[in-house]
């Protein structure tokens, strides 16, 4: 139950973290910023909440010395463990996809923001870039054109010309941001998986003990 509470707290923190939420609520030209990252977070929230409920079931089953309740507890543990493994595999396979989707979203606004032809979406593109630059303390893509450097003072108003040359690429910052978050999710999933393995072992030992020595337990 405590482990489920910790996992739920970590997942809720990841869901409402200011850096990721500021970026993932952005909209540009009718398109929402890609929210693939939240899939893994929602899985953690669900697992944490269910773990707390299942933990109560296990405690009650142990107190009542009920093989039926402990068997049900074991069954739910197996299901949760399978979900954890599936989520870990999904996260590993999509570890680069999340940052790439946000980079593409940034680049689409970047192109419109430096458009000299007076695109109708230029103002909204500048606002989108401003959120990226402010949230990540970055500016540009790292391989910026001469045109972008000319208007960098407008797109990155908090940076002087000297600061712009030293500033981090937003591409790099996005990769680092979501790599750190996915690492934390993976660590949480690993801890939960280890706890579940011990839970399943102890549950089976207790069930066997109750069946073989009903008067002792």
Image (spheres, rainbow, N blue to C red):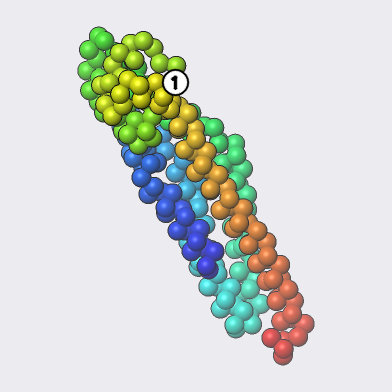
Residue at screen point 65% across, 58% down: 194
Q: Residue 59, how many percent across, how many down?
A: 57, 76
Question: Where does the C terminus fall, quadrant-wise?
Answer: bottom right
Task: Measuring from the top left, give residue 98's x and y in whole percent.
Answer: 49, 34
Query: Who is closer to the viewer here, 214 or 185?
Result: 185
Residue 123, image quadrant:
top left
Looking at the image, residue 56 lies above or below residue 148: below
Is 186 situated left or right of 119 in this image?
Answer: right
Residue 14 percent location from the top left of the image: 44, 49
Q: Where in the figure is residue 82, as x and y percent of width and height?
A: 63, 53
Instruction: Give me the residue at 41% from left, 34% from top.
Output: 34
Question: Residue at (31%, 26%) from the top-left corner?
Answer: 159
Question: Image height check: is 54 above or below 35?
Answer: below
Residue at the disc numbered 1: 142
Could you tell me which secondary element the residue under label 1 belongs to? loop
Residue 83 showing in the rendered view: no
Task: Identify the residue shown where x is 48% and y is 38%.
Answer: 178
- Tell which of 47 and 178 is nearer to you: 178
């Amino acid at each position: 139950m405590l482990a489920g509470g910790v996992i739920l707290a970590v997942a809720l923190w990841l869901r409402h973290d200011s850096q990721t939420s500021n970026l993932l609520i952005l909209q540009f030209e009718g398109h929402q910023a890609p929210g693939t990252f939240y899939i893994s977070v929602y899985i953690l929230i669900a697992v944490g909440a269910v773990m707390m409920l299942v933990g109560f079931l296990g405690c009650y089953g142990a107190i009542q010395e009920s093989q039926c309740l402990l068997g049900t507890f074991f069954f739910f543990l197996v299901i949760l463990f399978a979900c954890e493994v599936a989520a870990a595999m999904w996260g590993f396979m999509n570890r680069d996809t999340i940052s790439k989707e946000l980079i593409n979203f940034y680049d689409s606004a970047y192109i419109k923001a430096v458009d000299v032809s007076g695109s109708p979406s230029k103002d909204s593109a500048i606002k989108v870039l401003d959120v990226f630059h402010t949230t990540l303390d970055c500016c540009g893509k790292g391989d910026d054109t001469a045109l972008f450097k000319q208007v960098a003072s407008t797109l990155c108003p908090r940076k002087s010309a000297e600061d712009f040359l030293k500033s981090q690429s937003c591409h790099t910052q996005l990769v680092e941001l979501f790599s750190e978050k996915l690492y934390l999710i993976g660590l949480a999933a690993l801890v939960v998986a280890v706890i579940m393995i011990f839970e399943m072992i102890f549950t089976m030992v207790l069930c066997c003990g109750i069946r073989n020595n009903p008067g002792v337990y």
